[in-house]
Image: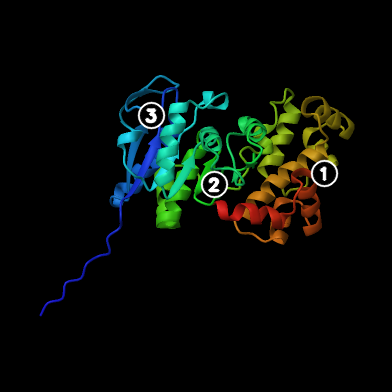
Amino acid sequence: MSITTHEPQIRTHRVALVVYDDVTLLDVSGPLEVLHQANRDGRLYAPVLVSPHGGEVTTSSGPTLAGTVAAADAGPFDTVLVAGADHLVERVPDELLAAVGGLADRAERVASVCTGAFVLATLGVLDGRRATTHWRHAQALARRYPAVEVEPDALHIKDGKYVTSAGISAGIDLTLALVETDHGADVAREIARELVVFMQRPGGQSQFSTAMATPPVRTDPLRAVTATVVADPAADHSLSALAAYAALSPRHLTRLFQSELHTTPGRWVERVRLDRAQQLLLDGHSITTAARLSGLGSDETLRRAFARHLNTTPTNYLRRFRATG
């Protein structure tokens, strides 16, 4: 008698990517490419472009998405992902609300990229939940929907069956996180390597670092100093050391920081180190190790920096964000 064994069948996960006229193209193509790469080793996902009326959809940058399926004819989906667009900040069209509402009711998981969160918030499904969106629109989301707990400084957040992400390229991070939930970290990391993107930025990582938020500096010595600090936050960046590196007097360097960056050298260095400490904590390092490797030094110094700049503690920060990535 022969015994036949069968490999366990992996159910194909149906994903609706909701699109509409003037949608942001990368909000759609980024997640779509992640799902496409996930299917290289088998049919893990079946993505479908869904729109309120079906047919062609013109993106905000010009290219047309052809062959979209009308929401009323699309059937049930495991995941519904709503892409964003600038005009959603001002008003969410009724036809888009109806389309997403019908799809979301039957879905196991509902996600949004960028201002797609405004669609979910307008439907009321984010009330009493944590959510995020593009940093530029976070205040508008919080102001218009006070029942939503908006986290303006996170890449993506999961609360219940709802997952929201920051703007544009963060849709890739969001979809990688969804793939990791469905099929494990190894599959998600392999996709990240194939796409040549960072190995899955944690959901709690800041949408923009101090280095990115710093306005361009005009003077060469200050530009050299800031680049040096960002390259190695844990090095000796005392005022005297920075002044010596720039070949300036401490007083002159302080004046440059005040005139161009509107802060002191010490405060700016501390903020860069805090950015590094946040990333170290999310990567799994202890508070003590994060304090040492970031240059903040001690647990107490790290706690004071978190309180001063983020109005929280390292422990609460991890509690909020460790489950989002």
Visual colour scheme: rainbow
Marks 1 and 2, the one that precedes in the sequence: 2
What residue appears at the point 64 percent right and 53 percent down from the top-left corner?
A: 320
Question: Residue visible at 45% across and 38% down?
Answer: 101
The image quarter in which residue 288 lies = bottom right
Q: Image check: 140 left or right of 71?
A: right
Quadrant in which the N terminus appears: bottom left
- What residue type is disc 1 on? Ser
- Calculate the distance from the C-alpha at mark 3 to the C-alpha at mark 2: 32 Å
Whole-Å distance between the Cαs marked 1 and 2? Answer: 30 Å
Decide which of tag 3 and tag 2 comes sooner along the chain: 3
Q: Is residue 176 above or below residue 260?
A: below
Residue pointed to by mark 2: 201
Q: Which residue is mark 1?
A: 238
Residue at the (51%, 34%) spot, across then down:
119
Q: Nearer the viewer, residue 225 or 245?
A: 225
Tag 3 residue: 52
Disc number lying in front (1 or 2): 2
Q: Give the amino acid at mark 3.
A: Pro
Find the residue positioned furthest to the left: 1
Which of labels 3 and 1 is toward the front? 3
Dot 1, how many residues are within 10 Å of its Cα: few (below 14), some (14-19), or many (20+)?
few
Extreme-right residue of the structure? 251
Task: Examine the rendered structure and indicate whether residue 270 appears above or below residue 50.
Answer: below
Q: Secondary structure at mark 1?
A: loop
Residue 299 can be seen, yes or no = yes
Q: Amino acid at mark 2?
A: Arg
**Pointers 3 and 2 in contact (CB under 8 A)?**
no
Q: Which mark's residue is nearer the viewer, 3 or 2?
A: 3
**Residue 266 in the image: x percent, y percent?**
82, 40
